[in-house]
Amino acid sequence: MQILTHQEIDQSLCGEPFEVGEGRSRVRLECDSRMAADSSGLIHGGFIFGLADYAAMLAVNHPNVVLGSAETRFLKPSRIGDVLVATADDTSPEARKRHVLVEVHCGEELVFTGSFTCFVPAQHVLDTA
């Protein structure tokens, strides 16, 4: 399926999609030193959130989709060298207000969960015309 949203995103920081289908996406992120929060190699949670958010946007896959809110849980820390995979499922694909559930795994371990509320406005949020 063609990617219709977030086409200018830096995939090295938000993940590379490897599955985009009707109401579902899977995105892979290799955690590197640019993402470290400290000298121990702990990955800053913002990068994990960015991965999950990007996966949610791709599950909706509409040019105008935007995030309205998110309820998230960080379950385990991530480190430099970890490979994270986010799986997102749009549970309300016919609505303008979408609910997308996202899980992020490192191997078999669940490290993050989120419920994302996304909106699909008639025009781009920055379009003032």
Image: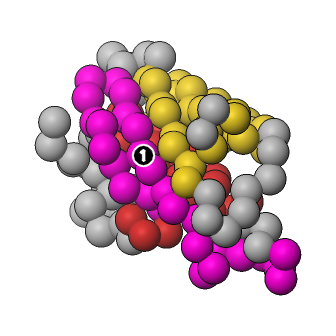
Q: Amino acid at mark 1?
A: Val
- Give the residue number, with chain letter if any, for mark 1: 27
- Which of the two residues, 97 or 5, is positioned nearer the viewer here? 5
- Which of the two residues, 16 or 1, is positioned nearer the viewer here? 16
Instruction: Please tell me which residue is depicted at 49% across the width and 69% down the height of the picture.
Output: 13
- Is the residue 80 above or below the residue 114 in the image? below
Tell me if I can see residue 114 in this picture: no
Q: Residue 32, percent across and down?
A: 58, 73
- Is the residue 47 above or below the residue 25 in the image? below
Tell me the quarter of the picture where residue 116 sits.
Answer: top right
Label 1 residue SS: strand
Tell me if I can see residue 86 in this picture: yes
Quadrant where the C terminus sits is: bottom left
The range drawn in magenta is 14-40
- Is the residue 95 above or below the residue 71 in the image? above
Instruction: Please tell me which residue is depicted at 40% across the width and 38% down the height of the picture.
Output: 26
Tell me the quarter of the picture where residue 95 sits.
Answer: top left
Instruction: Please tell me which residue is depicted at 62% across the width and 44% down the height of the picture.
Output: 106
Instruction: Please tell me which residue is depicted at 64% across the width and 74% down the height of the picture.
Output: 35
Q: Residue 25, percent across and down?
A: 37, 35
Colouring chosen for the image of the structure: secondary structure
